[in-house]
Image (cartoon, rainbow, N blue to C red):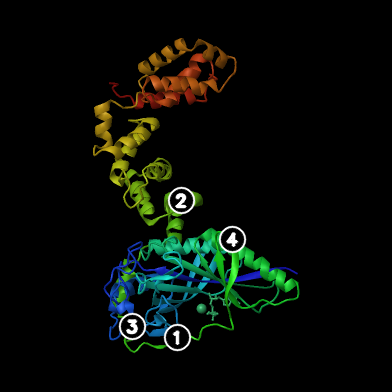
Amino acid sequence: MGWQAVIGVEVHVQLRTGRKLFCRDRVAFGAEPNTLVCPVCLGLPGALPTLDPRAVDLAVRTALALECTLHDTSVWARKSYFYPDLPKGYQITQFDRPLATGGTLDFDGPAGAGRVRIRRVHMEEDAGKSLHDRIPEGTAVDLNRAGTPLVEIVTEPDLHTPEDVRSFLGELRQLLEFADVSDCSMEEGSLRVDANVSVRRAESAELGTKTEIKNVNSFSGIERALRMEIDRQIAVLEGGGSVRGETLLWDDHRASLRPMRSKEDRHDYRYLPDPDLPPLVLGAAVVRSVRGMLREMPRARRARFQAEYGLSSYDAGVVTQSRAGADYFETVAEGCADAKLAANWVMGPLQALLNARAATWDAPPVDAPRLIELLGLVRDGTVSDRVAKQLLDALADGPEGAEEIVASRGLEQVSEPAMLERWVDEVVAAFPDECARYREGEDRLLGFLVGQVMQRSRGRADPRGVNLRIRERLGGVEQAPGRGGLSSGRGAGSDRRRPSS
Ligand code: ADP
Ligand code: MG
């Protein structure tokens, strides 16, 4: 009999307001410990919380992006537990009346499309941080994080493989980025995932006892931890034992899981409504305005890019990696009226340029209008592909536009038959051996000879014209009447004739 794994996740997302949920302190990663604190987030007696409405906007945005039902009224609750990094002795969260419930998120996994139901989305504040390596023989506490605004997203147990969990989380992260809710950095703790997992006989309808995996800080870590835990649970059950409902901590260095606490010594959180905070009431106007600001979500955008611009599903996935990248692509595709060319440039030379200069799509070294101008020159044959790629660097380096640079440096593509003939003559004369070997059937030398011409022309020669002329000269072209390749090649060449400098 086969086993089926059942997995549900709880995701904590840091909202990008830049400030705390109930006081005016800034939120910043890596600041000097305990410098971003005040009486409210330190939990000093008498200090009262005041809700930041911008955090509510972002939480509402999250819930809408996940197609949840928003509740007019949600209630702040105190979740009590004793921990050194929790100064008040309780966390302000939402319990039995959360912000939103009942959403869905579709994703594309390695085994096909999947759908996960979202159980709830609620708001809460983060705790501080215990630092175990800051002072010798002791644990230090940094409360800079205390009070950081979060949303917690809880799914139904609808996932069944570690690979699907990873795909789902990738889709979720992209959605949160598109909705502009969070920077979703796992390294900086602004996206944290706890995974709940159980196994059952494939034919069983009942859920098995679950364990909860915490402390994983990468998607690949989650995949590995789940794989390991699923195997462990199956081995326990096949050995006649039973799974203990416990919380497990993932150790990334050792790639191992160790028990943190068992179900028996689970906290009694003593949830109660927070008397310091009135219920959160969402005005219809707020919800309407947030809904109006919400942009197209990644999956819909990928589908539209395929339908509207004829991109392959792979290409649509690549250009929608980030919202800013998708915006960039779409501006260029519209501006140059050639979506395929736009996609190739965005995914190829532009992405390479970004990588080389450690830039992001939010601030690309060449903005969309300037790329559109460049692609215009490619499309009408003013410059060769090769020169265009060189131009990209020049565009990134200075303020001049593509046309300006082409004019000032004399980079127009040369298709004039007389010029091409002259370069080909020179190359044929300079490489008699290579020409002879090509004539005798060493086809790959064609590329070499074309390359020599391109070099002589400083990349300006129309490569198709050159290719054709060399083959013609050295007998590589079948002169089959009616095939038309040769004559149309010549036609295209003369159409694009431009004065050479
Ligand atoms: P708990 O009360 O232990 O916190 P919840 O019912 O609140 O459990 O569920 C927490 C998370 O665990 C949810 O994401 C849910 O989908 C998932 N979950 C619940 N039961 C199981 C199970 N038997 N196997 C796997 N995941 C589960
Ligand atoms: Mg829970």
Q: Secondary structure at mark 1?
A: loop
State the image coordinates of residue 201 (x, y, percent, origin top left): 70, 73
C-alpha separation, residue under disc 4 versus residue under disc 3? 42 Å
The residue beneath circle 1 is: 96
Neighbour tally class for label 4: few under 14, some 14-19, many 20 plus, Cα within 10 Å: few
- What residue is drawn where x is 25% and y is 29%? 407
Q: CA distance from mark 1 to mark 3?
A: 13 Å
What residue is pinned by disc 4?
Answer: 255
Amino acid type for the residue under numbered disc 3: Leu
Report which residue position mark 2 lands on: 318
Nearer the observer, disc 1 or disc 4? 4
Choose between 381 and 83: the one closer to the eye.
83
* First-in-chain label (1 vs 3): 1
Residue 161: tell me if it is visible.
no
Q: Secondary structure at mark 4?
A: loop
State how far apart marks 1 and 2 are (Cα). Answer: 40 Å
Mark 1 or 2 closer to N-term?
1
Which residue corresponds to mark 3?
280
In this view, which residue lies farthest toward the front?
137
Q: Quadrant of residue 375?
A: top left
N-term mark: 3 or 2? 3
* Foreground residue among 299 and 354: 354
Q: Quadrant of residue 286?
A: bottom left
Within 10 Å of disc 3 (Cα), the crowding (few <14, some 14-19, many 20+) is: some
Q: Determine the residue positioned at 46% across, 57% down.
A: 303
Q: Which badge, 4 or 3, comes first in the chain's sequence? A: 4
Q: Residues within 10 Å of mark 1 (few under 14, many from 20)?
A: few
Tell me: 474 left or right of 241. left
Cβ atoms under marks 1 and 4 closer than 8 Å: no
Picture layout, residue 129 above or below residue 320: below
